[in-house]
Amino acid sequence: MIDTNTFSLTEIDRIIEMAWEDRTTFDAIEEQFGLKHQEVIAFMRKQMKASSFKMWRKRMGNRSTKHAALRSQNISRFKCDRQRNISHNKISKR
């Protein structure tokens, strides 16, 4: 298991953000930060309030887009097309 104390605050925020995003797979989190699916769950449990963690787990439980093997072949991107390419993935103003 990876020691989560090695991550900077910016990396912690990014991991949490990626875990909440519907289209970002656990595989993408593992590729970027080295956290496997179960490690992401443990990481989220450690970083979030209990009620927020329960809400996240309930939300992620039915998301086939979070698992690359279960995704539709039509989905080739991992983020919403309305998100900016760089600036911390915030939705751009229209």
Image (spheres, grey):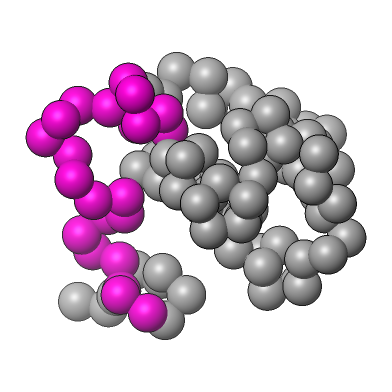
Q: Quadrant of residue 36?
A: top right
Residue drawn at 85 percent across, 43 percent down: 46
Q: What x and y, as percent, mark residue 73?
A: 15, 30
Q: Residue at x 79, y 47 (%)?
A: 2
The image position of residue 47, as x and y in percent, is 81, 49
> In the depicted view, which residue is nearer to us: 2 or 82?
2
Q: Tell me if I can see residue 49 in this picture.
A: no
Q: Is residue 70 magenta?
A: yes
Most prominent secondary structure in the magenta stretch?
loop
Residue 9's place in the image compared with 72, above or below, is below
**Is 59 inside the magenta-drawn segment?**
no
Residue 48 lies left or right of residue 78; in this view the side is right
Tell whether 19 sits left or right of 9: left
Q: Residue at x 67, y 68 (%)?
A: 11
Whether residue 67 appears in this view of the structure is: yes
Q: Which residues are magenta?
A: 65-86
Specify whether 28 is left or right of 10: left
Seen as rendered, the residue at the extreme left is 74
Query: Which quadrant would residue 9 be assigned to in this image?
Result: bottom right
